[in-house]
Image (cartoon, grey):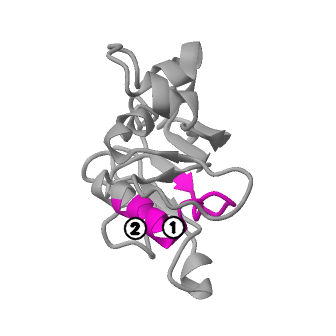
Amino acid sequence: MSAATGQFKVNIVGDIMLDRLINKKIFEGRWPTKYTYPYGNTLDVLKDCDFFIGNLETSITKHSVKWPKTFNFRMFPEHIQAILNLVPYSSSILSHDSTLNHVQLPYTSRANPLYLSLANNHVLDYNYQGYKDTVESLNANEINYAGVGEDQNEAMRPCIINFQDREGK
């Protein structure tokens, strides 16, 4: 956030899908850049913001039982670094002591400027266990999200984030 203008930069993207060849070939390889490779030369642009929002178009699980449908996507939990690589370089709106209030999830970060929507047609690709594994991975890595829950009311709760500049304004 610019102290002079009160403005901040938000990058919003559509589907983040890290399955198929990415999960099976690239992540399992020994390349030193395997967790940045899926973003190619766009990673610097994606991270150049105060806050990042994207749609996680995959489950994060090792569970192998698929929901019976045409397309099922998953990435393995040990490859979560590929998502963490999307955390902005330097957020001026969320410092380590700023307030981030997430009304739905008690284990969500208090200073992570990364938000993922799970309200899509792939969060249950690997059934309820895949959904639970996804939520556990995001919570364990302090990644903010919304759009899911144990019932309709919980799934519809918004992610509420209170932004402050570094001076606490």
Quarter of image, res 166: top left
Q: Using residue 106 as the reference point, say whether residue 153 is left or right of it.
A: right
Camera sees residue 43:
no
Q: Which residue position is annotated with label 2? A: 101
Residue 22, how many percent across, how many down? 52, 28
- The disc, 2 or 1, on the residue closer to the chain's N-terminal end is 2
Q: Amino acid at mark 2?
A: Asn
Q: Is residue 96 above or below residue 38?
A: below
Rendered residue at 58%/46% (across/down): 53
Rendered residue at 60%/40% (across/down): 16
Q: Which residue position is annotated with label 1? A: 160
Can residue 153 be found in the magenta stretch?
A: no
Q: Using residue 130 as the reference point, say whether residue 152 is left or right of it.
A: right
Rendered residue at 40%/44% (across/down): 76
Do residues under tags 2 and 1 come within 8 Å of each other at their CB atoms? yes
Residue 111, how many percent across, how many down? 33, 51
Q: Amino acid at mark 1?
A: Ile
Can residue 129 be found in the magenta stretch?
A: yes
Provide the secondary structure element on which disc 2 rests: loop
How dense is the environment of label 1, judged by Cα within 10 Å: few (below 14), some, or many (20 and up)? Answer: few
Q: Using residue 7 as the reference point, say whether residue 98 is left or right of it.
A: left
Provide the secondary structure element on which disc 1 rests: loop
Viewer-side residue, 68 vs 116: 68
Quarter of image, res 156: bottom right
Task: Look at the image and tell me in which quarter the C terminus lies.
Answer: bottom left
- Please report the bounds of the magenta region as a residue range: 116-136
